[in-house]
Amino acid sequence: MVDWKKIRKDFPIAKRFTYLDHASASPMPKPVYEAALRYYDELVGFADFSWNRWISRREEVRRKVATFIGAEAEEVAFTSSTSHGMNLIAELIADQGGVLTNTLEFPATTVPWIHRRAKMRFLKPANGVIDYAPHLSADGTGTVKTILTSFVQYQNGFRQDLEAIGKIKGNRFLVVNATQGFGYLPIDVKHTGIDFLATNSYKWLMAGYGGGILYINRKWIRKFQPKSAGWRSAPHPESFDNRHAPLKRDASRYEYGCPPFPHIFAIGAAIDYLSEIGFSNVWNRILELTDFLIDNLRKYDFEILSPLSPPFRSAIVVFKVKNAQELTDQLLAKRIYVSARGGGIRVAPHIYNTEADIMNLMKVLRQVMR
Ligand SMILES: Cc1ncc(COP(=O)(O)O)c(C=O)c1O
């Protein structure tokens, strides 16, 4: 049994606000903050005497991330954001053929490809659901080379069945923006057949702004030549060779310069924090809270825009209101934090929220709507 009350104490924000917007950004739990601070303490006290320790701690985090997503450590690189990771992916394969994506995507998914003039095709959702299958089976001539999709859509919380796409993708690349599912939904890149994945650290993982993760299936690391490289892309950076540009044989070739240690250590501490609670407990708690929210929204006749069939569920629930921005501003004035997205209000609770938080949202929402 998880002591959720104790967990809530790790989030002092809960004393001041009803914060239900983890799809925008999460507060950092205290133990993760302390792990990140430890780096700054070491920097103040020891500077580069700590270098080797930091490098080995970074490799420890890389292994943790790899285990978390079912990858090998050599297939994981640290980045600064989802956008950074997606650009590195597009840099490798945007010229390989058509890209099948959809109109719900957050621009971080699509912009790097459009920028490189990839041939894009945007599917429209039906009832909030994107189904790639009919388009892939109709793609007889094989014009689609890349399936580009979010794991969970930021606008309506629709969760894509990545495993189903993996089964029918054939020889196409499956490229996933995992941002809105990363940290609370299981993801297994190998089992699913994901070729490339990008995500960041500041949303559901709760590790703060500035960090990101890139996964590249090892088959593609050496097959595609990156256009960018840096001194730390070399297998032996400390040889300071300024006349050649050999590349590491693993995904860390994309880490061009010195590492953003505090972000990487926060990612490691966040994975530890969530895995100590237990990832299935994390997801079940989020389901309990979103079930409770959905029941209440139905009770007051709100139309829910998020697809609600169980395989489509995520931590995001969007319901329809007129003037969503105005209402979210009014809620904010009452210290309730949600977002206006996808034609309604987006509510995105995390593990430390409570049923009382949801009740507070419902109560104040009905007040401000009167
Ligand atoms: C699905 C999705 N991808 C990416 C981002 C932004 O990622 P980053 O700022 O790390 O590039 C967001 C932000 O809301 C998002 O919802």
Image (spheres, rainbow, N blue to C red):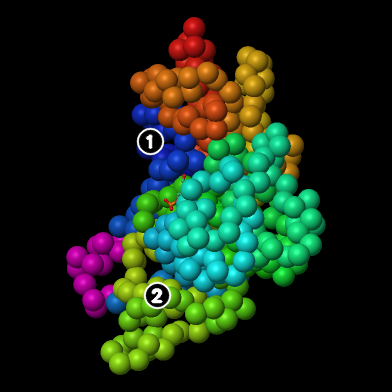
**Vertical arrangement, residue 131 with respect to residue 289, above or below:** below
Residue at the top extreme of this rendering: 370
Q: Quadrant of residue 141?
A: bottom right
Residue 187 visible in the current orientation: no
Is the residue indicated by label 1 positioned so its CB lies within 8 Å of ligand 1?
no
Nearer to us in this view, 111 or 353: 111
Q: Seen in the image, is 368 located left or right of residue 308? A: left
Residue 235 located within the stretch drawn in magenta = no
Q: Position of residue 6 (x, y in %)?
A: 48, 40
In the rendered view, tell whether residue 185 sits above or below residue 146.
above
Numbered disc 1: secondary structure: helix
Residue at 55% across / 28% down in the picture?
343
Percent position (x, y) of residue 255?
Answer: 40, 73
- Write the residue at 76% across / 59% down: 139
Residue type marked 2: Ser
Q: Which residue is mark 1?
A: 13
Closer to the camera, 186 or 240? Answer: 240
Region of the chain picked out in magenta, as a range: 38-50
Q: Main secondary structure of the magenta part?
A: helix
Q: Which mark is residue 208?
A: none
Q: In the rendered view, would you say 272 is above or below 309?
A: below
Query: Hey, what amino acid is under mark 1?
Result: Ile
Q: Is mark 2 within 8 Å of ligand 1?
A: no
Q: Is residue 45 magenta?
A: yes
x and y percentages locating residue 363 in the rendered image:
51, 15
Q: Secondary structure at mark 2?
A: loop
Q: CA distance from mark 2 to mark 1?
A: 40 Å
Circle 2 Cα neighbour tier, 10 Å, few/some/many (<14 / 14–19 / ≥20): few
Examine the rendered structure and indicate whether residue 307 appears above or below residue 194: above
Q: Quadrant of the N terminus?
A: top right
For label 2, the residue is 228
